[in-house]
Structures are given as structure tokens and as C-alpha cells.
Amino acid sequence: MKTIFEKMFGQYRGMRRELYILFWGKAATNMGAMIWPMLTLILSNKLGMNAQEIAKITIAMGVVQFPANLLGGKLADCCNKKKLIIICDLVTVICYLTAAVLPVSMAQILLFFTAGIFQTMENPSYDALVADLSTSENREKAYSLMYLGLNLGIILSPTIGGILFENHLGLAYAIDGLTTLSSTILILLFIKDITPVKEKQTIYEEAKETQSIWKILREQKVILFFLLCWSVYQFSYTQFNFLIPLNMEEKEPCTLA
């Protein structure tokens, strides 16, 4: 009788070794979520900002990360994806480790923000590599594995971050940097072959260099619908990291008028 572990992870057997390395890279990179959920608390509890000031900083971060994601997608198309991930990770590691030795300040927040931009830029390269290294038969499982790695990082990191928040915030930055460094080393040493799998392309995978992105989107309206739904989802999800910490910081209990 198969164990629960075998049932959950047995489906991921038989894929290319590079995909398992990317899985760990995804999990380790998302250890950066250790700081993101605490950002509102850091700005309010440690730096004494009010809700309006925190909202402005959060919005500014979101606005800057959008073009960073687009730039990352463009670079993934024209550059070596493995090298791009390594470069972005190294910048992220430097920012985190530098922030770890600084006192709590806006300089520390700026370093964290810079790390977040480069993490955003590398995401399209991760996704493109998964597509290149998987086949049509196991591509769904490959992306499922990456999503599992993302969730593992997001689940573990806030737990550790909450323990370190009060007295060891610098250590949280250091752990973020070291875990990202570990994934960078694994990618550098063990991902040797990033040659895309050769197989018959589906209609959705055919190259369309002669068409503009706007024409492609008009022909694939389901993508526009997905982008709309994803935007609403991301907007709603972001409120958890902003509103819940502020409510937890309330000194007086809420009363109904």
C-alpha cells in the first residue's frame, strides 16, 4: 500500500534532473517571503510609519515591479536563461546579506526592495526553462512541481520570520540571502544542459515572430481574460500582507458603533 508521501510526490518521477534543481531554486528563492509578510510590521512597528505612508511605499513597490517583470520576460527571450537567473540571484544575495548587517532603517528597506526587483526579473526565466526542459506529456507536472516549490518557500518562511521579527530581524535577511545562494550554487553546478526538448509543437507553441504581441493577444482572448482574473486575484491577495498586519497592530479593540 502506497504511503501518502509516495502518492503525493511519486507523480514527479522521471523528469529531467534540471527540473528538480529548479524546484529547489524556486523554494529557496521564495524564502524571500520571510520579509514580505512582515514588511508592513517593519514599517509600522520598527520605523513608526502610519497606514498612509505604508500604503504609498507598497504601491510604489508594486508599480516598479510591473515593468521589471516585463523586462525579465524580454531578457528571457534574448539571453541565456541560466546565466540570467544566476546574475539576478547574486544581486539578490548581496542585497539581503548587506541588509542583514544594517540596523532597521529605510536603507535596509531599499536593499530589500532592490532584491525583490531582481527576483521578479528572474521569474520569466524560471518559467521559460520549465517549458524548455519538459515535454508535452510531463509539462503540467513540471509546472506543478515548480508551484509546489513556491508554496513550500512561502509556507516555511513566514513561520521562521515571525519568530525572528522582534529581536533577530537581521538574521531573517541573512537566512533569505543564504537560502537563495544555495539555490544559485546548485543551478550553477548542476544545470549543464538547457537545450529545449525537441518535439512536435502545438498550435500554441508555434513561433510568431512576424506578429505583434497585441495581435497575438487579440487572437487569444482567453489570455486577456486570464490576465484580468489574475490582476483581480493579485490585488485581493496583496491586501492580506497590508491590512492584516495593520489590524494586528491595533492597540485598542474594535467596537461597533
Image: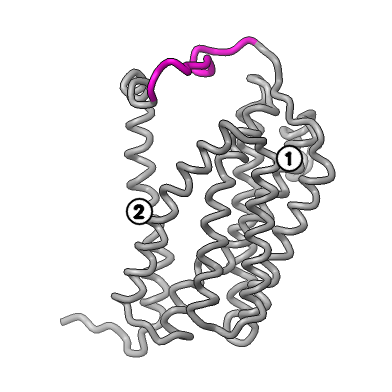
**Which percent across, then down, holds residue 145?**
66, 40
Amino acid on which disc 1 is placed: Phe
Magenta span covers which residues? 200-212
Q: Distance between the residues labelled 2 and 1?
A: 32 Å
Give the foreground label among 2 and 1: 2
Magenta stretch prevailing secondary structure: loop
Amino acid on which disc 2 is placed: Phe
* Mark before the other along the chain sequence, 2 or 1: 1
Residue at position x 54%, y 83% in the image: 104
Q: Is residue 61 above or below residue 256?
A: above
Q: Among all residues in the image, which is located at the extreme left?
A: 257
Is residue 208 inside the magenta stretch?
A: yes
For residue 223, what is the image quadrant?
Answer: top left
**Which percent across, then down, holds residue 129?**
65, 34
**Which percent across, then down, holds residue 152?**
64, 54
Q: Which of 76 and 58 is in front in this view?
A: 76
